Amino acid sequence: MTTSVLPTTEKIVQKPALHPVFYVASWIFFSSVTILFNKYLLSTLEFHFPAILTCWHLLFSTIVTQIMARTTTLLDSRKDVKMTGRVYLRAIVPIGVLYSASLVCSNQAYLYLSVAFIQMLKASAPAAVLLTSWLFHVANPNLTILINVVVIVFGVTLASYGEVQFVWLGFIYQAGGIFAEAIRLIMIQILLSGEGQNLDPLVSLYYYAPVCTVMNFIVALATEWNSFRIEDVWRVGILILVLNAAVAFLLNVASVFLIGKTSGLVMTLCGVLKNILLVVASIMIWGTVVSGLQVLGYGIALAGLVYYGVGWDGIMTYYTSTRKFAVEIWEGEASEGDVKTPSPSKLIRNVVIGASICVLAVILLWVGMATRNE
């Protein structure tokens, strides 16, 4: 399933035992594998039961988080959460319902749309969150940010217009998932942050998973149960389903460590790189046809996303520092005494931005060659 990473509180960066690149690579790996695995399961293996699959993922998460809470220290921060019956019913339950809606809608989209096109649509998620925050009066409208949002939406619209296999139902499901997730994030800000509650992804999953499991079971019972047969499970394989749920769960674990060891900004930029890699993977694995118009639209949306997350001054700072560092290394002038090596988090951001540009250039070149061959 498309597991949305739950909101986190940025922690103080401590000296990690492992290099931050390890945490970045782990998050990109599990996030990408989760999406590709679910597309493979729902589409290639023809397990056409997204609500049941989502319910299974959440049941798995419920069991594992309960075990982890009793056997590890990863969920110890839950002891700092003042979870009363009032807070649970007023905040956790409605947020859990929105989380379920987001997951089910996103999984339904995989039955109709390609992974590449879904990633392009997801580029509009920050715009959806921003517009929702204005609607709920959580943030004040800002002309500069509005222009940035318009650029992102324009890019996504262009990519949608260029989609070769456009299916309205799949588009509606994905849009519904994006806006359900946007409303959920704003509800967390209003209901939980307003109560002074800050939950990391694992603790959030610890509280949300049980109610989400019940919600998804009701949805699955009403929509998919009559057509579901136990033979479908045997056909796909128990091991595949368990592995699928485990990978989806490990994504939440990876996100905890990524933000704990780096920063939320690094995660945002890594998300851009991950989306580009998923588009490339979709082309390579499923032979997805990507038009030049889609590449142009997606490129515009990604540029808007990077600008939204970093700002122009940030982009120029990272570009200048990376260029200077690369030139000094290339000319053999870099040494511990005369070159100030960037901090791990800055180096990661530089690498992510540079890699994103390189991958995007490769996609443009590939599409150009494919167009000429046609």
Image (cartoon, rainbow, N blue to C red):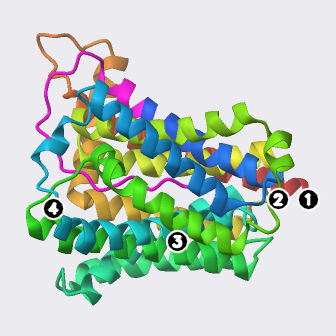
Amino acid under disc 3: Gly
The residue range painted magenta reads 1-25
Q: CA distance from mark 2 to mark 1?
A: 5 Å
Amino acid under disc 1: Glu
Name the residue: 13% across, 51% down: 81
Name the residue: 43% across, 65% down: 99
Name the residue: 43% across, 77% down: 151
- The question of residue 27 being in magenta is answered with no
Q: Disc 3 designates what residue?
A: 177
Q: Residues within 10 Å of mark 4 (few under 14, many from 20)?
A: few
- Location of the C terminus (image quadrant): bottom right
Q: CA distance from mark 2 to mark 4?
A: 60 Å
Pair 2/4: label in front = 4
Q: Disc 2 designates what residue?
A: 371
Residue 374 has which mark?
A: 1
Q: Main secondary structure of the magenta part?
A: loop
- On the image, the x and y values in percent for residue 34 come to 58, 43
Q: Do we see residue 239 in this rendering?
A: yes
Q: CA distance from mark 4 to mark 3?
A: 29 Å
Residue 84 has which mark?
A: 4
Q: Do we see residue 1 in this rendering?
A: no
Question: Is 220 in front, or is 192?
Answer: 220
Amino acid under disc 2: Thr
Q: Is disc 2 in contact with disc 1, using a CB cutoff of under 8 Å? A: yes
Q: Is disc 1 in contact with disc 4, using a CB cutoff of under 8 Å? A: no
Q: CA distance from mark 2 to mark 3?
A: 33 Å
Question: Is 374 in front, or is 291?
Answer: 291
